[in-house]
Image (cartoon, grey):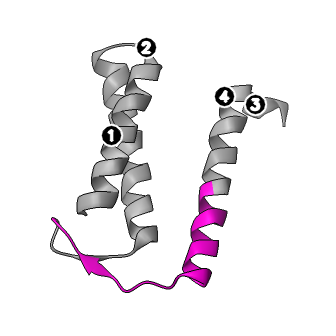
Amino acid sequence: MAWMAWTWPTAIFFGVIAVLLITFTILAIRFPETPRVGILRIETTRGDRLFITLLGSAFLNLAWLGLVGANQPYALILCLIYAAAVFRWV
């Protein structure tokens, strides 16, 4: 696995994704939900909103790298605000 260049930030990133998937699976089993229609006018569930959040956060981070530079902690704050908005209104 040396070709993958695992670093602590990379391991933490994938660990957080794994924990999120496990948490959302447990939530779906314990508290089933009905899809809701938000600002996008499509039915979404918690899992859908998580996917939209992860995808949007990836694009936000790429845009941040391209426009601002490598000061990523501020991009994380932006992504958390974006995630809160997606789970609230989408």
Say which amino acid is labelled 4.
Answer: Pro
Residue at numbered disc 3 = 6
Q: Position of residue 3 (x, y in %)?
A: 78, 31
Task: Name the side, left or right, on which 55 lies relative to 82.
Answer: right
At mark 3, the secondary structure is loop
The boundaries of the magenta stretch are: 20-39
Q: Position of residue 15 (x, y in %)?
A: 70, 46
Q: Is residue 81 above or below residue 7?
A: below
Q: Is residue 69 above or below residue 65?
A: above
Instruction: Rate crowding at label 3 as few (under 14), some (14 to 19) or many (20 or more) other CA atoms within 10 Å.
Output: few
Instruction: Rate crowding at label 1 as few (under 14), some (14 to 19) or many (20 or more) other CA atoms within 10 Å.
Output: few
At mark 1, the secondary structure is helix
Q: Position of residue 61 (x, y in %)?
A: 39, 31
Q: Is residue 8 above or below residue 39?
A: above
Residue at numbered disc 2 = 71
User: Cα distance, mark 3 to mark 1?
Assistant: 28 Å
Say which amino acid is labelled 1.
Answer: Ile
Closer to the camera: disc 1 or disc 4? 1
User: Cα distance, mark 3 to mark 4?
Assistant: 8 Å
Do residues under tags 2 and 1 come within 8 Å of each other at their CB atoms?
no
Q: Residue at x 62, y 39 (%)?
A: 13
Instruction: Rate crowding at label 4 as few (under 14), some (14 to 19) or many (20 or more) other CA atoms within 10 Å.
Output: few
Figure quadrant of residue 1: top right
> In the image shown, does 27 or 49 lie closer to the viewer?
27
> In the image shown, does 87 or 75 lie closer to the viewer?
87
The numbered disc on residue 81 is 1
Q: Quadrant of the C terminus?
A: bottom left
Residue at numbered disc 4 = 9
At mark 4, the secondary structure is helix
Of labels 1 and 4, earlier in sequence is 4
